[in-house]
Amino acid sequence: MNERTFVIIKPDAVTAGHVGNILNRYEEAGFRPVAMEMRTIDGEFADRHYAEHLGRDYYAPLREFMTEGPLVALILAGDNALDGVRELNGVTDPSKADAGTIRADFGSSVKANCVHASDSPESAASEIGLWFPELA
């Protein structure tokens, strides 16, 4: 099934120069970029993206991390994009991610894990609507 998902290449991966490598992994797996933009977000935008995490102990450091520098927001499309991209990314903790996944290869901690991807059709629709409203 051809579907779309939303991905963020996080500030740690941008700063480390891994954007091209990460994009290459997605393309080699058959996912094509539909939209892509490098931007720096402010705290208010981070709050909108991470609304379900507001008030949790870990949120303040996450908010600070996501607003500290440029990131790359993108929409990827392809067969089984939601599950396929998440599998390619690996689990949230890079130290527990399978070898060869993006997080195992480029992530350094649970917070600085280099990528985000939508976890459901509903979150993909919501995140695409937030980040790329013209494509929602």
Image (tube, rainbow, N blue to C red):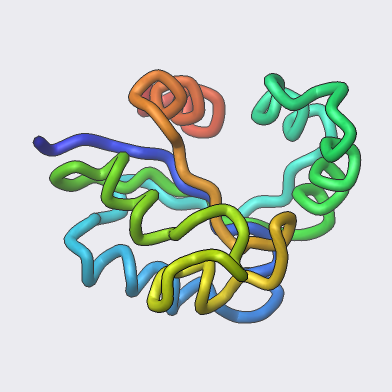
- Vertical order, 17 against 23 (above or below): below
24 vs 123, left or right, is: left
- The answer to which quarter of the image holds residue 89 is bottom left
44 vs 126, left or right, is: right
- Vertical order, 99 against 83 (above or below): below
- Vertical order, 57 against 67 (above or below): above
Q: Nearer the viewer, residue 23 or 52?
A: 52
Considering every residue shown, the one lying at the far front of the view is 96
- The answer to which quarter of the image holds residue 27 is bottom left
Q: Where in the figure is residue 120, as x and y percent of width and height?
A: 38, 27
Q: Where in the figure is residue 96, as x and y percent of width and height?
A: 56, 65
Number of disc labels = 0
- The answer to which quarter of the image holds residue 71 is bottom right
Q: Quadrant of the N terminus?
A: top left
Residue at image x 65%, y 51%?
39
Q: Quadrant of the C terminus?
A: top left
Residue at image x 40%, y 22%?
125
101 vs 76, left or right, is: right
Residue at image x 31%, y 40%?
82
Considering every residue shown, the one lying at the far left of the view is 1
Q: Where in the figure is residue 134, as x and y percent of width and height?
A: 41, 25
Residue at image x 60%, y 80%?
17
